[in-house]
Amino acid sequence: MPGQSGPEARTWEVPMKTLTTYRRASGDIFWHFRVACKDWPQNSFDERKDSEHPPERGGFCLKCIRIRTNERFLYLRKNFPFLVPSL
């Protein structure tokens, strides 16, 4: 809020759009989008980079989805603790 200072004052920052890299092993239907995924294709893969639109054909790796969900949860818990209950 304008005019406030201290812990009650919060700067709301909108994350910048980033370029997402999608990879799938050649011949596979599942796209990966988290490098931390243990199944991230290293060799013989199709790759697409995009900031707005994920690939239209194929599915997404469930491990990548889980990693991204955990990252978002941790971000929210760190930056907006009043939104995320303690476990």
Image: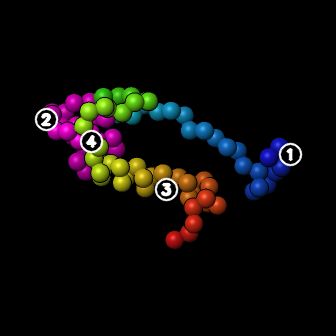
Q: Earlier in the sequence, mark 1 or mark 2?
A: 1
* Secondary structure found at label 2: loop
User: Residue at position x 75%, y 56% from top?
Assistant: 7
Percent position of residue 42, x then y: 20, 39
Locate residue 27: give its quadrant: top left
Q: Are marks 3 and 1 in contact (CB under 8 Å)?
A: no
Q: Residues within 10 Å of mark 3 (few under 14, many from 20)?
A: few
Q: Earlier in the sequence, mark 3 or mark 4?
A: 4
* Secondary structure found at label 3: helix
Q: Which residue is mark 2?
A: 27
Q: Is residue 48 above or below residue 82?
A: above
Q: Which residue is mark 1?
A: 3
Locate residue 55: give its quadrant: top left
Mark 2 or mark 4, whichever is nearer to me: 4
Mark 3 or mark 4, whichever is nearer to me: 4
Amino acid type at mark 4: Gly
Range of magenta residues: 22-47
Q: Which residue is mark 3?
A: 73
Mark 1 or mark 2, whichever is nearer to me: 2
Q: Which residue is mark 4?
A: 59
> Would residue 58 be seen by someone viewing this image from the given angle?
yes
Mark 1 or mark 4, whichever is nearer to me: 4
